[in-house]
Image (spheres, rainbow, N blue to C red):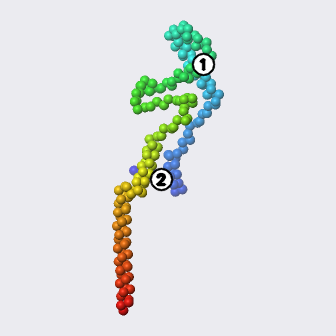
Amino acid sequence: MNTYMFIPEFQTFSSFLAGKKGGHKGRVRQYTSPEEIDAQLQAEKQKAKEEEEEAEAGDGAASDPKKKEKSLDSDDSEEEEEDEDYQPKHKGVEGIIDIENPNRVAQAAKKVTQIDLESPRELSRREREEIEKQKAKERYMKMHLAGKTEQAKADLARLAIIRKQREEAAKKKEEERKGKDAHKYVE
């Protein structure tokens, strides 16, 4: 049985495979107008209010005088209260499971009046470490220049040895020069 495929000469192998790889045009995009979005939000709010009223009526809490006073307040105050108590409902398993993570730090939102601009800003760990590293380097350089570090002592000892070698080499040259001068005069 022949397993080879016939490919015409004018067609390259890569263009032959082009049909398998590409060609996906994507799905049709649907755009929502701002009016439709507003209408959907209003419908959701209305539905939520109806559900709350049904829950209150079922519990018998509607006869409570405090609830009646709240219902007489303006709509603006109700919206503010809803915003303060609003907690998003988690879908699926997230709503059932309570996670207790001792390492998680809840970031509390600060009000503008609570922010103290004059207090010094706390440095991050990296910034603190960088500053400490720079200070340590400066201290080391001061001690090094004063000759108190081991490296400075080793450098000074090395320099003393080199100086001594140069002095000996200079003496040797001087003696050789004197020897040559004396040799010239002897002749």
> What x and y, as percent, mark residue 92?
45, 26
For the point 55% across and 10% down, the residue is: 66
For the point 50% across and 49% down, the residue is: 17
- Who is closer to the viewer here, 129 or 21? 129
According to the picture, the residue beneath numbered tag 2 turns out to be 6
Measured along the vertical axis of the image, is residue 28 above or below residue 55? below
> Which of the two marks, 2 or 1, is nearer to us in this view?
1
For the point 43% across and 46% down, the residue is: 132
Residue at the right extreme, as displayed: 35
Disc 1 secondary structure class: helix
Amino acid bearing label 1: Ser
In the displayed structure image, the side of residue 61 where residue 139 appears, left or right: left
Mark 2 → mark 1, Cα distance in angstroms: 78 Å
Amino acid bearing label 2: Phe
Which image quarter is the C terminus in? Answer: bottom left
Q: Specify the quadrant of the image occupied by residue 105.
A: top left
Measured along the vertical axis of the image, is residue 177 above or below residue 18? below
Q: Specify the quadrant of the image occupied by residue 169.
A: bottom left
Callout 1 crowding tier (Cα within 10 Å): few <14, some 14–19, many ≥20: few
Asked if the residue at tag 1 contacts the one at tag 2, i.e. Cβ–Cβ closer than 8 Å, the answer is no
For the point 50% across and 52% down, the residue is: 14
Disc 2 secondary structure class: loop
Measured along the vertical axis of the image, is residue 148 above or below residue 41? below
> What x and y, as percent, mark residue 27?
56, 37
> What x and y, as percent, mark residue 157?
35, 63
In the displayed structure image, the side of residue 42 where residue 170 appears, left or right: left
